[in-house]
């Protein structure tokens, strides 16, 4: 008599061996996967056939050139404001007993200015000019107002979405600011050229606000007393 293996007789619930997979089933499975992939591919972007320079291909190269020049000029404007803040705050006179405290506050403010965006730089520049006893800027309020207006346009052209141009080369620029205000101006190359020129004039005005006091503008080789 043959005894059952240790553990008792096999349970009636034991899994039965699975039947062998038929070749026809494999063929159908592969066919379904191929069809599914083909359908998915039909909804994908055909990257190989995109126009050159997509998605900027609808505007003229000169349009993008002047947009780039304008954005770069606004970058220079921010740098100029930071340097002017250094000039005004670094040449302000203090009573001897206040110098050490003023210096300790000055260094962190300069570090912060290098990472500030345009609007905070405008605030700090205006405050530095007003606090300087030798400042000779008579139209500071007008300059600050122009800087504020320029900053609104600067944010739009840097962060907005450019719609396809019309036959006259005019493009709608769509941009929402943090207040939910919608910038919906229509812009062409001439507008960008004029905006770039206006930003340049703002840079020059800021440099002049320092040099008219007799100081050399920081980072330049122009005339005046170097600020050390």
Image: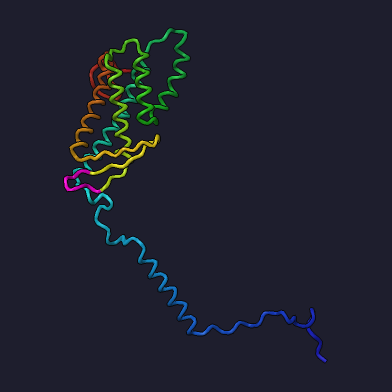
Name the residue rendered at 42%, 23% in the picture: 109
Image: 48 above or below 140: below
Give the x, y percent position of residue 147: 30, 26
Residues in magenta? 164-170
Q: Position of residue 2 (x, y in %)?
A: 81, 90
Residue at figure coordinates x 20%, y 36% from the top left:
191
> How many numbered marks have been drawn onto this rendered protein structure?
0
Residue that lies at the very extreme toward the left in this rendered image: 168
> Relative to residue 26, is residue 72 depicted above or below?
above
Residue drawn at (35%, 30%) of the image: 118
Residue 139 occupies which quadrant of the picture?
A: top left
Percent across and percent down for residue 176 are 36, 39
In the picture, which quadrant includes the C terminus? top left
| Left or right side of 179 for 208 | left
The structure residue drawn at horizontal position 83% and vertical position 92%, both measured from the top left corner, is 1
Q: Quadrant of residue 99?
A: top left
């Amino acid at each position: 008599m043959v005894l059952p293996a240790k553990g008792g007789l096999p349970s009636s619930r034991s899994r039965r061996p699975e039947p062998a997979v038929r070749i026809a089933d494999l063929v159908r499975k592969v066919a379904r996967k191929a069809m599914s992939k083909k359908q998915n591919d039909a909804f994908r972007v055909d990257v190989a056939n995109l126009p050159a320079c997509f998605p900027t291909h609808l505007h003229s190269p000169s349009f993008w050139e002047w947009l780039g020049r304008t954005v770069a000029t606004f970058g220079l404007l921010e740098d100029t404001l930071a340097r002017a803040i250094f000039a005004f705050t670094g040449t302000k006179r203090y009573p001897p007993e206040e110098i050490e405290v003023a210096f300790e506050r000055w260094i962190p403010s300069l570090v912060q200015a290098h990472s500030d965006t345009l609007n905070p730089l405008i605030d700090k520049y205006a405050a530095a000019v007003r606090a300087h006893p030798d400042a000779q800027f008579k139209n500071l309020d007008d300059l600050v107002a122009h800087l504020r207006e320029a900053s609104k346009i600067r944010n739009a052209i840097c962060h907005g979405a450019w719609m396809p141009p019309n036959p006259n080369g005019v493009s709608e620029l769509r941009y929402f600011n943090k207040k939910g205000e919608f910038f919906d101006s229509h812009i062409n190359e001439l507008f960008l050229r004029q905006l770039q020129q206006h930003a340049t004039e703002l840079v020059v005005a800021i440099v002049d606000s320092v040099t008219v006091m007799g100081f050399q503008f920081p980072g330049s080789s122009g005339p005046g007393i170097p600020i050390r």
